[in-house]
Image (cartoon, rainbow, N blue to C red):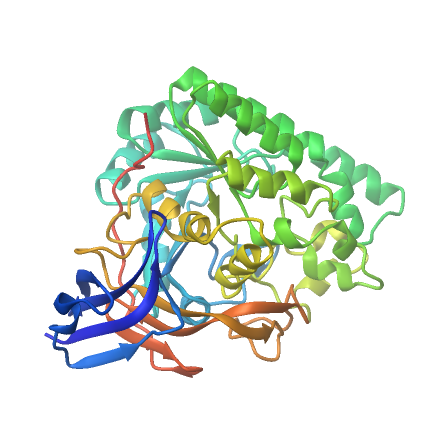
Amino acid sequence: MTRTVIRGGLVVTAAEEMHADVLIEGERVVALAAYGTSVAEGWTADREIDARGLYVVPGGVDAHTHMELPFGGTSASDTFETGTRAAAWGGTTTIVDFAVQSVGATLRAGLDAWHAKADGNCAIDYGFHMILADVNEHSLKEMDLLVAEGVSSFKLFMAYPGVFYSDDGQILRAMQRGADNGGLVMMHAENGLAIDVLVEQALAAGHTDPRYHGEVRRELLEAEAVHRAIKLSQVAGSPLYVVHVSAASAVAELAAARDQGLNVFGETCPQYLYLSTDNLAEPGFEGAKYVCSTPLRPKEHQAALWKGLRTNDLQVVSTDHCPFCFVGQKELGRGDFSKIPNGLPGVENRMDLLHQAVVDGHISRRRWIEIACATPARMFGLYPRKGTIAPGADADIVLYDPTATQTLSAQTHHMNVDYSAYEGRQLTGRVRTVLSRGTVVVDDNRWFGRAGHGRFQPRATCQYLI
């Protein structure tokens, strides 16, 4: 069994910071000891990694990705191979992707299809949520079976009528089942029926440019849906996790529910923290690059999102990574914004953008690790195997240079997409070395990983329930 020692870095977890050496045996962390102590200096290893001047942090856990997702007449451009490789380059060592139930099909068929896509192709570890697109007596019973085998979270949509949409009765039934079996319901909270009316009216008025995607998906229709989802979860007695929160009024709904002591949680994404409707309004068809749902909001919403992350009214930052190339995919919506595939690339950029938030004073170092590593691992039943550096944890570890600078660009990123949502943005901090279960997969701008190294991770139920 290979022994590795990481020497002299500042170990940063959600709980503490300390200059320490980390001892790894095989795939697991076995010990930490203060740097320079006789205990640490007595360790012998097959490999020593010098981390002086670097942060030593847990590998990121991105709990919201969509590799190879069919959507809008095309499919997300990242495969499980390219997407997990890009994630590793950016310091993320675990993803939780979404398997999709097709209307009229079983959950099992959807899950099996996603296992087939991912098996043998992932460079890092992965798990699955299950998208419930057809809530019926059979699929409700299947939820119990999936929870038992480690697929313990289920996503429903208040948006996309005719595709993923569930009505309030279906949502209530799924929440009731989750209350019984421990499954966490994840909600895409937008009033899709009302949005479709506004889309139809906008197109009839000749408003076809990408910026209208943001205008029809009104902030009020996100807030209303969040409020409704919270009330349904109260009726069901179930927990609720609201994905990709983008609007100040939606954060306010979550904060009010949490003030009542409800098991209600919220996630936001880097695009809502750093991008805005200004991007959707870029000239020509450039705004199509920034079409995602929930949509980008005016810049003034960013302050409410940062505040929510500091006050813990928002607990997780995931990417909702769902990339579509500008050429040939986003272009499907020329002349009709409603046909632009919804989604942004970002799985490679999340850890760096959140470190920039530390540099800018939005969050602390420990909060960076909390929202990017520890809380998503706890929320989705992966902790303490993932999300921390402690004896017994998987040796998913990132050596991070907090002073290095970089410029984000499609020319240098590893995602399989022809543009960067953050093109030209300069950041302070970058990944130097990444270990996945004790194996070095990235080091000093070189790739050492391989497809098939990543393993499926069965998950326990949410660890935050009262």
What residue is drawn where x is 73% and y is 59%? 288
Residue 365, by quadrant, is bottom left
Give how far across and how far down residue 116 sits, in percent: 33, 61
Q: Tell whether 452 sits left or right of 392.
A: right
What residue is drawn where x is 26% and y is 54%? 457
Q: Nearer the viewer, residue 134 or 293?
A: 293
Q: Tell whether 209 sits left or right of 117.
A: right
What residue is drawn where x is 55% and y is 22%? 256
Q: Tell whether 103 sits left or right of 108.
A: right
Is residue 136 in view?
yes
Q: Tell whether 15 sits left or right of 337.
A: left
- The image shows residue 388, relative to residue 152, as above or below, that is below
Give how far across and how far down residue 465 sits, in percent: 33, 29
Give how far across and how far down residue 1 sits, in percent: 10, 74
- The image shows residue 35, relative to residue 337, as above or below, that is below
Is residue 322 in view?
no
